[in-house]
Image (tube, grey):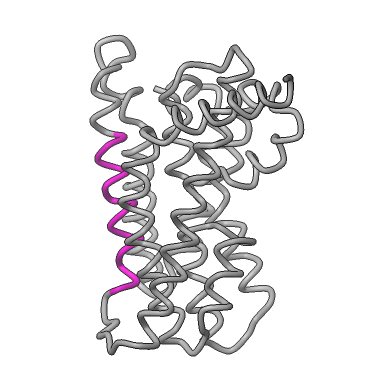
Amino acid sequence: MKKKSHKSSMLAAAKAAFPHTLPVMAGYMFLGAAFGILLKDNGYGPIWALAMSMFIYAGSMQFVAAGLLAASFSPWTALAVTILVNARHLFYGLSTLEPFSGMGWRKPYMVFSLTDETYALLSSMNPPSTAQDYDILFFISMMNQCYWVLGSLLGSLAGQWLAFDTAGIAFAMTALFAVILVEQWLQAEKERAVQGFLKAHAPAMIGVGVSVISLLLFGPDRFLLPAMGGLLVLFAVLRKYFEGVVAA
């Protein structure tokens, strides 16, 4: 009876989680397909797309990795790019220490599956307080990855069967981050009356400012690493100032 009750509880949690994931599903199916097509264009088939999306699962870094696989291999460059591109996850991890504290056996997966969109979705929800709340968070994270894996696989398969002009397809992830920036700006507007314009919009303005300065100093082919490094240092130094801003 207890086993049946647990199964029913998990099913209820999955049903409750699914509506929250619909916006991510729409984006991940398309972006995952774009990644699969790009990877296939670089000479790596469906098995590679499936494995990378299952075991790496880092959207923007997967797009970067597709380019690294096609270029001359440089392990130190790959390491530096990976650390800097994914450095923002340091801040995600710090802010989820408390919400994930009651996740039990699910906690390692929750840490692994914490993408930008999943983090934004989980942050917008009420802090978990019951066993079902934790189940809902788990299913949201798992469903989001399933969308990405399925999109990547379908994109790679489509790339085998159909001819695609892949020019500009790598811009899909850039476009996604532009949308996230706009959403963050609009969300910060809600806190403007409490925090003031500067504090509410400081993260976005610093991100744009450091990126533009790096672009002017290092050029379009070399600005990414200096920009990511500069942002990592600045946000680490100003972390206490920004407490509550990112979550807002």
- Quarter location, residue 183: top left
Q: Position of residue 50 (x, y in %)?
A: 55, 70
Q: Is 143 or 92 nearer to us in this picture?
A: 143
Q: Residue at x 56, y 20 (%)?
A: 133
Location of the N terminus (image quadrant)? top right
- Quarter location, residue 223: bottom left
Q: Residue at x 46, y 44 (%)?
A: 116
Q: Residue at x 61, y 22 (%)?
A: 99
Q: Position of residue 197 (x, y in %)?
A: 26, 21
In the image, taking residue 21 as reference, residue 237 lies left or right, namely right
Vertical placement of residue 83 versus 74, above or below: above
In the image, taking residue 164 as reference, residue 18 lies left or right, namely right
Q: Position of residue 2 (x, y in %)?
A: 74, 20
Q: Is 233 or 24 nearer to us in this picture?
A: 24
The answer to if 179 sits in the magenta stretch is yes
The magenta-colored residue range is 169-184
Q: Position of residue 23 (x, y in %)?
A: 31, 42
Vertical placement of residue 171 versus 147, above or below: below
